[in-house]
């Protein structure tokens, strides 16, 4: 999925379906094309689509093109973020990282976070979910009531649109598996308060970005869907 860098030129294209045409408009403004190595070229004009950054509105439009609802908001540190609701009802957040400046800056790192109701969820349950339910994402308990599934999308150096679709799709699939598999039991007997010794609570600082009042997804039988395959399919073959 990763491409080497050489001569750079802007690339635009159109897609055949209504869903793909929306994503194409976004990518046209964010994409640059790099020459493939001579051994990989099919002809003199061969080019591969590569993205090394996105603005938050561009990322939001990619989700919209796949049928996800989005709301761009001001997040931690005054950088914009996206609240995203999947067709299956699951809500998650996209936090912009490593941006040149606040506002409409291009960003090459994004943190994706799905919050879930964690009351009664034990650390042993989280460890078990890491073992049997997660492909790439991290599960954390932030306090006695909030947990998260999170991952990062790293674009520095260049990635293909298909890579974005796969990476985000795996995060959404992980969120589906984890949040639907959670069965709250006995509350963990571990304090999340800062102890007298000055040691930090277990999850403190684990997230680069965090919200005071996020949408908490229900767990277990009441868990919503995150529609990972829908997003991955919409981004395929760009």
Image (spheres, rainbow, N blue to C red):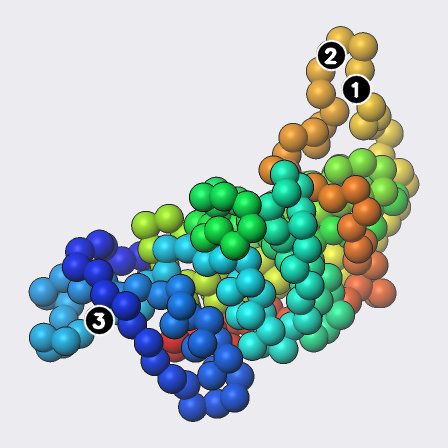
- The residue wearing badge 1 is 194
Between 144 and 11, the one nearer to me in the picture: 11
Residue 111 percent coordinates (x, y): 57, 48
Q: Which sits earlier in the primary sequence, circle 3 or circle 2? A: 3
Residue 235 percent coordinates (x, y): 47, 73
- The residue wearing badge 3 is 47
Left or right: 169 as drawn, with respect to 226 = left
- The residue wearing badge 2 is 198
Q: Which sits earlier in the primary sequence, circle 3 or circle 1? A: 3
Q: Is 102 situated above or below 192? A: below
Q: Is 14 situated above or below 98? A: below
Mark 2 Cα-neighbour bin, 10 Å: few <14, some 14–19, many ≥20: few
Residue 232 percent coordinates (x, y): 51, 71
Circles 3 and 2: CB atoms closer than 8 Å: no
Residue 26 percent coordinates (x, y): 46, 71
Query: Is any part of residue 141 visible from this angle?
Result: yes
């Amino acid at each position: 999925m990763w491409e080497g860098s050489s001569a750079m030129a802007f690339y635009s294209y159109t897609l055949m379906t209504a869903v793909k045409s929306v994503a194409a408009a976004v990518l046209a403004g964010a994409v640059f094309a790099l020459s493939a190595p001579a051994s990989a070229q099919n002809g003199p004009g061969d080019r591969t689509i590569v993205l090394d950054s996105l603005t938050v509105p561009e990322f939001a439009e990619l989700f919209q093109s796949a049928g996800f609802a989005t709301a761009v908001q001001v997040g931690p540190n005054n950088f914009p973020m996206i609240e995203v609701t999947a067709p299956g009802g699951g809500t998650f957040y996209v936090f912009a990282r490593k941006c040149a400046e606040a506002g409409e800056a291009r960003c090459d790192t994004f943190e994706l976070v799905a919050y879930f109701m964690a009351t009664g969820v034990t650390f042993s349950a989280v460890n078990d979910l890491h073992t049997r339910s997660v492909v790439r994402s991290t599960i954390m308990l932030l306090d006695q009531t909030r947990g998260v599934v999170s991952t990062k999308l790293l674009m520095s150096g260049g990635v293909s649109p298909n890579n974005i679709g796969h990476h985000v799709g795996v995060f959404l699939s992980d969120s589906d598996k984890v949040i639907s598999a959670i069965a709250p039991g006995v509350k963990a007997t571990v304090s999340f308060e800062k102890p007298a010794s000055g040691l930090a609570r277990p999850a403190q600082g684990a997230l680069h970005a965090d919200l005071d009042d996020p949408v908490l997804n229900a767990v277990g039988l009441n868990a919503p869907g995150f529609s990972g395959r829908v997003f991955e399919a919409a981004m395929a073959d760009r």
